[in-house]
Image: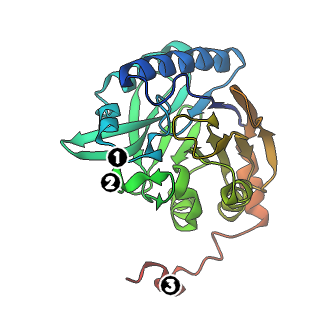
Amino acid sequence: MSRIVRGGLIQVTVTHEGTAPIDTIKKAMIEKHIRLLEEAARKGCKVVCMQELFYGPYFCAEQKAHWYGMTEPVPTGPTTQLMCETAKRLGLVLIVPLYEVENTGVYYNTCAVIDADGKYLGKYRKNHIPHCPPGFWEKFYFRPGNLGYPVFNTAVGKVGVYICYDRHFPDGARCLGLNGAEMVFNPSATTAGISEYLWKLEQPAHAVANQYFIAAVNRVGVEKPWAIGEFYGQSYFCDPRGQMLAVGSRDKDEVVVADMDLDKIQEVRNVWQFYRDRRPETYGAITAP
C-alpha cells in the first residue's frame, strides 16, 4: 500500500507595515497562521510548513538592531510552545521558521520541527547566510548555522529542512539525502528578478539529484516601508522525478496542498542508482579550503 502523505505550505502577506510595533506584528501574524493551520487540517494535511520568519515581515531589508526584538529561544520560547500545542490539537507535523536567540547577541535563522503529538523534535539553523544589497542584509541578523543537516523522524516520515538561500547550495541538499530525508521543506523569502527563474529550477534539480520530495514556500506581496521587490509566492511541491505536484498563486494568501507518495522514492531509486554510483573519494575539492 502506498505511503501517501498530504502536505501543506502556508504563503501569506504581512498584516502590518514594518513601522508597526513588533508585538503587534507578531501577534497578528501568529493569529493569521493559526487560522490557516486549522484550514490545512480541515483539508487533510498531515505536515505543514510556514514561510521564512513567519511571524513578521522580512525585516532583513534594513539593518536595525530594533529587529533583534523579534528573537525567541527555541524550544522554550512562547511561539514554539504555542506551535507544540497547535500541532497536538490539530494532529499536524509542523515546520516552524523562527528568529532564535541562543545567547545574548547570538541569533540564528531557525526552523523548529514539531511532531503530530506536539513533541518538539529539534531544530535546523540556516547554514548559508546571504548579504546581498540591496535589501538582503542577513549577516547583520544571523550567525551561520552550527547544527549540520539533521533529519527528523516524524509521524509522516523523515523530514529535512533547508532555509531560503541554502537552496543555492547543492552540497547541503545532498547531505540531507545522505542523512535519510524523504521530504525536504524550504521556507523562503524571495523577490522577483533573477531568483524567480531559479525558484523552479534549483530545487527540482535537488529533488532529482537526491531522489526525495521538495516542498518550497515563499511569502507574498510587497512589504512596506522597504518595498525591495515583490515576494512572488508560487509555493510548490515537487516529486523525486522533478515533476511539480502543486504550485501556489503569485499574489494571494493560501494553503498549497499536495499528496506525496513516499513509495515513489524507492521506485525512482530502483531506476536511477545515484547513491550507488556516487564517488565521494573524488570530491575532495568540494571541502578544500
Q: Which residue is drawn at 77% across and 58% down?
A: 268
From the top left corner, tell me how far across and down residue 1 is, in percent: 77, 35
From the top left corner, tell me how far across and down residue 244 is, in percent: 80, 47
Mark 1: give few (<14), some (14-19) or many (20+) Cα within 10 Å.
many
Question: Is residue 263 or residue 114 the one in the foreground?
Answer: 114
In the rendered structure, which disc, 3 or 2, sits on the residue that comes first in sequence? Answer: 2
Mark 1 and mark 2 residues within 8 Å of each other at the beta carbon: yes
Residue at the left extreme of this rendering: 104
Q: Dot 3: what SS?
A: helix
Residue of label 2: 143
Picture colour scheme:
rainbow
Question: Is residue 272 or residue 240 the one in the foreground?
Answer: 240
> In the figure, residue 23 lies in which quadrant?
top left
Q: Which residue is drawn at 18% across and 42% down?
A: 104
Residue of label 1: 108
Question: Is residue 138 or residue 209 the one in the foreground?
Answer: 138
Question: Is residue 32 or residue 282 the one in the foreground?
Answer: 32
Q: How far apart are the alpha carbons under marks 3 and 2? A: 31 Å
Which residue type carries mark 3? Glu
Residue of label 3: 281
Q: Which residue is drawn at 42% across and 46% down?
A: 62
Q: Residue at x 61, y 29 (%)?
A: 13
Q: Is residue 195 above or below residue 152?
A: below
Q: Dot 2: what SS?
A: loop
Q: How far apart are the alpha carbons under marks 1 and 2? A: 5 Å
Which residue type carries mark 2? Arg
